[in-house]
Amino acid sequence: MTRLRLGPVLRYVDWERGDAATVWVETDRPCTAEVVCAGGGGGSAETFQISGHHYALIPVTGLRPGTSTPYEVLLGGSRVWPLPDAEASGFPPSTINTPEPGADSARITFGSCRWAAPAEGEKDPAGPDALDTLAARLVEHPEGAYAERPDYLLLLGDQVYADEISKATRRWLAARRDLREPPGAEVADYEEYTHLYYESWLDPEVRWLLSTVPTCMIFDDHDVIDDWNTSAAWVADMRATPWWRERILSGLMSYWVYQHLGNLSPAELAADPLYAEVCAGPDGTDALRAFAGRADQDPASVRWSYRRDFGNVRLLMVDTRAARVLKEGERAMLDEEEASWLADQALDDTRPYDHLLIGTSLPWLLPPLIHDAEGWNAALAAGLRGRRWARFAEDLRRRSDLEHWAAFPASFERLARLIAEAGSGPAAPATVCVLSGDVHHAYVAEPTAWPDDARPDTAKVFQLTCSPVHNGIPSSIKLGFRFGWSGPGQRLGRGLARHGRLGAPLLRWRRSAGPWFGNQLMTLTLRGRSAELRLDQAQQVQTGRKEDGGHSRQGRSKGGARLVMAMTTSLTQE
């Protein structure tokens, strides 16, 4: 009997007609994979093969709009999902929720940075996992919680950590190869990447959650390696390293299979020549490997970014890692074609929208001290004050992760002007929200002063940063982030800016909420032109606690952890 190795993962759900979806699976051998829906509807696909692994992205059609439809997965005609012990384990059936055509509301939950290392013993070294606790809340309180079930889950980077592995994975690697040889206790090839996804997505709560809440994903650096594509010098050094080519090819190949494919709509899949080639042959490894090589050598040849419309909400998920221009003097967060694509999608008024979400793994608005420090560092690294300062700046850039939007000043300003343009005029959205992660804490920031020639006259603009889902942050870094927002920190930042001859900033901003530290998720509830924001944190609490007149807002997870609401606010109320 064919086994289900991983999945099902519910990915694309159609919001235009509300009648279609896609479901991703990995199997242990070639087969026909099917989704069968209660009451009718479903679909099938033949598996394709990559490096000895078998996958299918199953198109599901015939769904009824505005319904919640339970589904099963069959491989070779035999049911493999739900798992045989699903009822005993307490998990309800996996369902596909479809919107009514013309829906004017959407609930979007987002976060990033999920280190999936299992706990050693009883204590999880990173604390409670926010995805575990979200799943537990939906499982344990289906009637109340399903009213707050996310319509989509956005995972904004570092879905797996190729360079920070668990003790269990280290033991698995040590049984496979000599860890004294580079890259040591890090992922080296495609097979080892598959192990990371098994470790992450086979977690029972997370597996059920991903089977029933559709997801959009984008990579960040740890999906490949810390500080991936920080600078041209960094790339040159890595390409001179013997093990790097296999690492980058395997990272891009596995991302394409496990994350990127599910971001695409059925129409986009049908138009994708690589997907057609991989599915047509008995083994797509060589074709995918060649594609990954081109993507590494010529990032402009590939677009990882994509657009999704959820009724009156537009999401633009932006690749801020592979699409960079790194040549000193020409540095840009997005190459010209990618930046033009982003502008075209944001300003496309053929389908009006009420809210614009720009998903970028790296925050656009940072604590002001850190923003100025990154701009100062970029200026020095470009040679503004000579070679000695440039060498110092390059070393500091790598050691301190100085490679956010602020480290690409022209791109920072270009995004600011695009947001201002998109947020102006009679057809402008009510909000423009930049959704980010990466920095292992959460906060809300708002621009307070725009240049006269680039000022949104309609939309409210926010930087919404939320991470980690499951990771940690040293106390010293916490203090640094807090200091970065403070008055003394901002004055220090302006001093660095003057030394780097940066001039006056294009705009100013303030932190309007946070910072929060811990494992957490943010949720945007968008109805018409209103926007509500909520922050939930995974916390160890006593069971049985009730809030707000006895209505539970929490769900139990492993070790008595719950998802607890830490903040809720309106983004549109004056």
Image (cartoon, grey):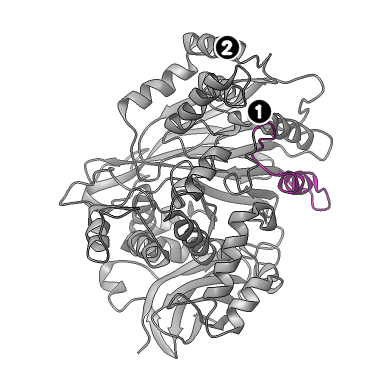
Placement of the N terminus among the 4 image quadrants: bottom left
Q: Is residue 170 above or below residue 330?
A: below
Q: Residue 46 at what x, y percent from top left?
A: 54, 84
Q: Residue 297 at what x, y percent from top left?
A: 61, 55
> Splitting the image into 4 quarters, where does residue 527 fall?
top right
The residue positioned 59% from the left and 28% from the top of the image is: 406
Q: Amino acid at mark 2?
A: Arg
Q: Is residue 62 visible?
A: no
Q: Is residue 355 above or below residue 270?
A: above
For mark 1, does the 10 Å Cα neighbourhood hold few (<14), some (14 to 19), or many (20 or more) residues? many
- Distance of label 2 from label 1 (alpha carbons): 15 Å
Q: Which residue is mark 2?
A: 494
Give, as a single range, the part of the protein colored magenta: 328-354
Q: In the depicted view, which residue is nearer to us: 525 or 210?
A: 210
Q: Is residue 124 above or below residue 139?
A: above
Badge 2 or badge 1: first in the primary sequence: 1
Q: From the viewer's perspective, tell me whether residue 34 is left or right of residue 304.
A: left
> Splitting the image into 4 quarters, where does residue 11 fall?
bottom right
Q: In the depicted view, which residue is nearer to us: 177 or 344?
A: 177
Quick one: SS at disc 2? Answer: helix
Q: From the viewer's perspective, tell me whether residue 152 is left or right of residue 85.
A: right
| Label disc, if present, on residue 409 of the rendered structure | 1
Q: Amino acid at mark 1?
A: Pro
Placement of the C terminus among the 4 image quadrants: top right
Q: Residue 539 at what x, y percent from top left?
A: 30, 40
The residue positioned 68% from the left and 20% from the top of the image is: 507
